[in-house]
Amino acid sequence: MPRQKGTDPSTQVIDAVLELLTAHGYDEVQLREVARRAHVSLATVYKLFPTRDELIVTAVEQWMASNTYADLTPPPPGGTLRESLMGLCRTVFEPWERHPRMLEAYHRARSGPGGHRLDTQGVTAVFPIARDVLAGADPVYLADVALILTNVTYTLIGRFAEGTLAITEILPAIERVIFRLTTDNEPDARAAGRASGGGEGGLDPSLAAPFYHPDTAPDPG
């Protein structure tokens, strides 16, 4: 099959994969279709990328470098910790909001063979900025913030990938978490403690989503 002039086969193959990922999704990346769109032979695809997993991880890596991590910059001086953390999260997530199929591709590629490369890429890109944002903080506080934000973020991405959360709900959820992490929550905790043991309102079972299913759950009342 003829190759496009001036472009090396590897670039053509990756471009074809990204075209399929952004337009049609992860499952549509089939190697014969990739070869057809890239104007190379199937043998060339296998020579460059021995497995489909390696091919997709490489394509997602390149997309992340050009989109998600390309505009990462240190926060402006004088901002609050909350503002700085939210600025960092927006920079990372807004490209995914514009290309939601790439977030699904990221999640699935990260969960498969070679997915550790995406974690390494993310740490390499984000750590220097996060280090500046959190400079001077207590190490125990830093560890707690990192643990909570990391687990919340990956849970939200997983819920999006499985179809139980809209992509536009991710950043607002992260913003609420950051607000709680950077705010004195003691007044709310004291109020909740005083109200325990009775009264109206309280915990709605729907807050346990995605684990709560009203059609099968017992009546919480």
Image: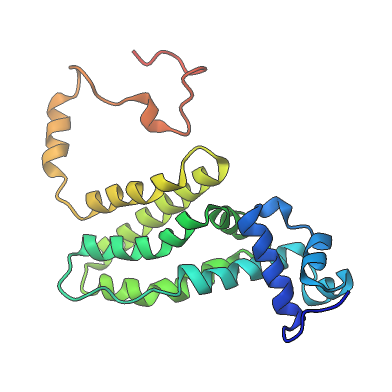
Residue 190 position (above or below residue 219): below
Say which residue appears at 74% left-offset and 72% top-offset. 13
Q: Is residue 194 left or right of residue 172?
A: left
> Foreground: 174 or 119?
174
Residue 6 position (above or below residue 42): below
Looking at the rendered image, the quarter that the N terminus falls into is bottom right
Residue farthest toward the bottom in the current orientation of the protein: 6
Say which residue appears at 83% left-offset and 74% top-offset. 40
Q: In this view, does 111 lie to the left or right of 194?
A: right
| Quarter of the view holding residue 197 | top left
Image coordinates of residue 157 in percent, x first then y, are 49, 50
| Quarter of the view holding residue 79 | bottom left
> Foreground: 171 or 127?
171
> Foreground: 169 or 215?
169
Say which residue appears at 65% left-offset and 65% top-offset. 18
- Can residue 12 be spotted in the picture? yes
- Can residue 111 be spotted in the picture? no
Image coordinates of residue 177 in percent, x first then y, are 30, 49
Q: Is residue 56 left or right of residue 157?
A: right
Image coordinates of residue 29 in percent, x first then y, are 73, 57
Image coordinates of residue 93 in percent, x first then y, are 42, 59
Q: Is residue 3 left or right of residue 56?
A: right
Say which residue appears at 59% left-offset and 60% top-offset. 110
